Amino acid sequence: MASEAIPDSWRAVLEPVLATPEARKLGGFLRAQEDAGHAIYPPRGSRLRALELTPLDSVKVVILGQDPYHGPGQAMGLCFAVPDGVQVPPSLVNIYKELEGDLGIAPPRHGDLSHWARQGVLLLNNTLTVEAGKAGSHAGRGWDAITDACVAAVAERPEPSVFILWGSHAQSKAARIPALQGDTPHLILRSPHPSPLSAYRGFFGSRPFSQTNAFLEQHGRGGIDWDMDRSLQF
C-alpha cells in the first residue's frame, strides 16, 4: 500500500484502517508477491483509481465489483471497466445491453467507465488486486477492511445515494454495513450479476440506470449521464 497515494478526500476514512495489523499484513503480502516475480493487476499507482476519480463528497452512486480482471492490460482500478482499446469483457457487454434496454443508449465502443466515475459513480471492487491469471487470488488478504470502510463512509453520509448491488457477493458486502440496514436514506438496488452465467435470471430488465436517475433527481442531486461514448471526450 505504500506505493498508493491516498486521495485527499478519502484520507480521513482510510488512514485509521491502514494503521491496523490487517492492512500492514496486506502490504507485506503484496510486496512479497512482487518480490517473488508474480504479476499483479492493476499495476502500482492505479489500485486506488476509483477513489481518485470519485471523491467521497461527490459520490452519488456505488457499484460494487468482486476483484479486478486478471488478464494482461485489463484491470484499470475501476470495477467492470477496461482501458480503451481492450476488448469489452462479457459482464460489461451485458451491462451495456441493459443500459440500451433501459435508457436506449447504444452500446459504447469501449469499456473505459471513467466518464461514470467522474460524475460520482464509485466503481469499487471488494478486492483491489489480483495475481495474473488467478481470479480471486487476493481475496481475504486484507482489502475487505479497506473497501468496507469506503462503502461505510458513503453510507454514513446524509446525502441520499444509490447502491447498485449486482450478485450475491456485492449484496453480502453491503449487508456488513450497518448504515445500509433498516431505515436508510439511500436507494439499494439488488439484482443478479451481469455475468453471462446469471444475467438472464433477472439482471436483464432490472432497469438500474433509470431507477438511479429518478431517485437522484427526486432528491436534488442530479442524474448521471450514462452515455459512455462521451467519455472519450474527457
Image (cartoon, helix red, strand yellow):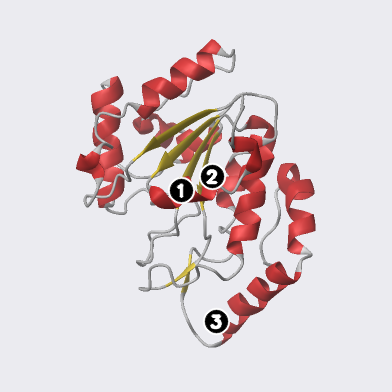
- The residue that appears at 27% across and 32% down in the rendered structure is 98
Q: Which mark is residue 81?
A: none
Q: Earlier in the sequence, mark 3 or mark 1?
A: 3
Which quarter of the image is occupied by the N terminus? bottom right
**Percent position (x, y) of residue 44?**
57, 66
Residue 195 vs residue 173, the one in the foreground? 173
- Which of the 4 image quarters holds residue 202? top left
Q: Which mark is residue 174?
A: 2
- The residue that appears at 62% across and 27% down in the rendered structure is 183
The residue type indicated by label 2 comes to: Ala
The residue at which mark 1 appears reads as 170
Q: Is residue 145 above or below residue 206?
A: below
Q: Is residue 2 left or right of residue 71?
A: right
The residue at which mark 3 appears reads as 33
Q: Is residue 121 above or below residue 78?
A: above
Q: Residue furthest front?
A: 182
Check if mark 2's residue and mark 3's residue have beta carbons within 8 Å.
no
Q: Nearer the viewer, mark 3 or mark 1?
A: 1
**Percent position (x, y) of residue 13?**
74, 48
Q: Is residue 52 left or right of residue 166?
A: right
- The residue that appears at 37% across and 33% down in the rendered structure is 228
